[in-house]
Amino acid sequence: MSLRILHLSDTHLLAERARHYGKIDTSGLLEAAVAGAGELAPCHAIVVSGDISDDGTPASYTFAAQTLAPLAQRWGAPVIWACGNHDRRAAMREALGLPGAPLDPIFSVTDITVGEARWRFVAADSSVPGRGFGYLGEQIHRIEDAVTNANGAPTTGGAPTAGGAPSPAGTGEYFHGAGDEPLHSVLVLHHPPLAAPTVLHGALRLMDAPRLAQGFQSWEVAPDLVLAGHYHLAGRGRAGGVPVVVGPALANETTLGRGPEWESARARSAFSVVQLSEASIQQDITYLDGSVAAPSGGIEPGEEIFAYSPEEVVTIGRRAGRPGWSPSDPLAWDGPGSYLLENTLGTGSKGQ
């Protein structure tokens, strides 16, 4: 039986339904995405791959959970949350009931059974507080343990709620619906282990992606799939032989017309359904019509939201980018393990 995942990413919610960049109603877009997804065939899990919030407020996370809860309950699907560079760990953890100490990386494991198959979702935290680039560090060992240990037991923690978080009494990782069948796994990150589409995203990419890819090749068991976001541009690739699917952003879409030295985006919002079977991995993207992106007389669907010049990109990259970054760095990796990373962005199938 195939696995269906509703994949949402980069919702960039703000408290009191404030607009992203003062223009885009991301709260309304999330509601529209949930309504649209509800008209599709049910999914077995809902994945939100980071940058859930833009302002890091508890209210923005509460809104996300409350908006997704009815659909999750109707489908009987857990919600898997990953932390992005715009998220704030303490507020996210408290509002969503996620395990761990307030400022620790947010790491969770959720097991479900689909037919006779066991699927494990491992959500790791690639965020670096106060910066924009990604880094997993010692979490790579935790990922290996989670994807290779088919009979792992939860630490202190309660059963998951319909929203996919532990019960209020629980404080640890949880496994939902675990059994004795062979284990398949999906790794959820915010920062993709793939080359960047722009110079700025190159500054903000996953710093230790080559190390992760090398792990995939050497571990006894590797994930079946990696789901990620961050680039605001759908795409596909492989890391260490593992398929990587980058979801589109709900907030806006990265544009490339000016060249990679610029960082620009337009008002285009989408979500995707990823379906895994023994034969294939399919990413079906649903674009929203933009009717909730702005009030009458506001920004139009497809209209440019922002455009940072190459000089502005350098300033942002030096402030938020990975240590040692230079604007002349290649968008793809070099050095040990870099040959294990390959991708093509902007190639997701549109589907519905």
Image: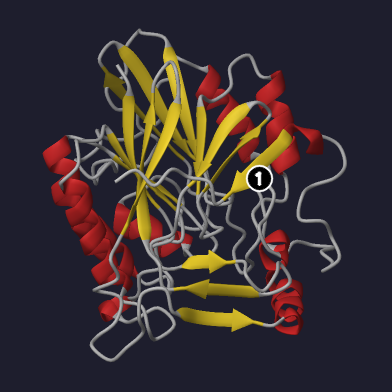
Q: Secondary structure at mark 1?
A: loop
In the rendering, at what x and y percent does residue 190 appear? 52, 51
In the rendering, at what x and y percent does residue 272 appear? 36, 47
Res 230 → quadrant:
bottom right
View extreme (bottom): residue: 297
Q: Pick the quarter of the image with the N terminus.
A: top left
In the rendering, at what x and y percent does residue 184 appear? 44, 19
Q: Residue at x 43, y 71 (%)?
A: 54
In the rendered structure, the answer to whether residue 196 lies left or right of residue 92 reads right
In the rendered structure, the answer to whether residue 273 lies left or right of residue 314 reads left
**In this view, 77 is above or below 253:** above
**In this view, 98 is above or below 210:** below
Q: Residue at x 71, y 77 (%)?
A: 313
In the rendering, at what x and y percent does residue 41 appear? 19, 36
Q: Amino acid at mark 1?
A: Leu
Q: Residue at x 21, y 40 (%)?
A: 161
288 or 47: nearer the eye? 288
The answer to whether residue 310 of the structure is visible from this angle is yes
Identify the residue under disc 1: 194
In the rendered structure, the answer to whether residue 77 lies left or right of residue 119 reads left
Res 300 → quadrant:
bottom left
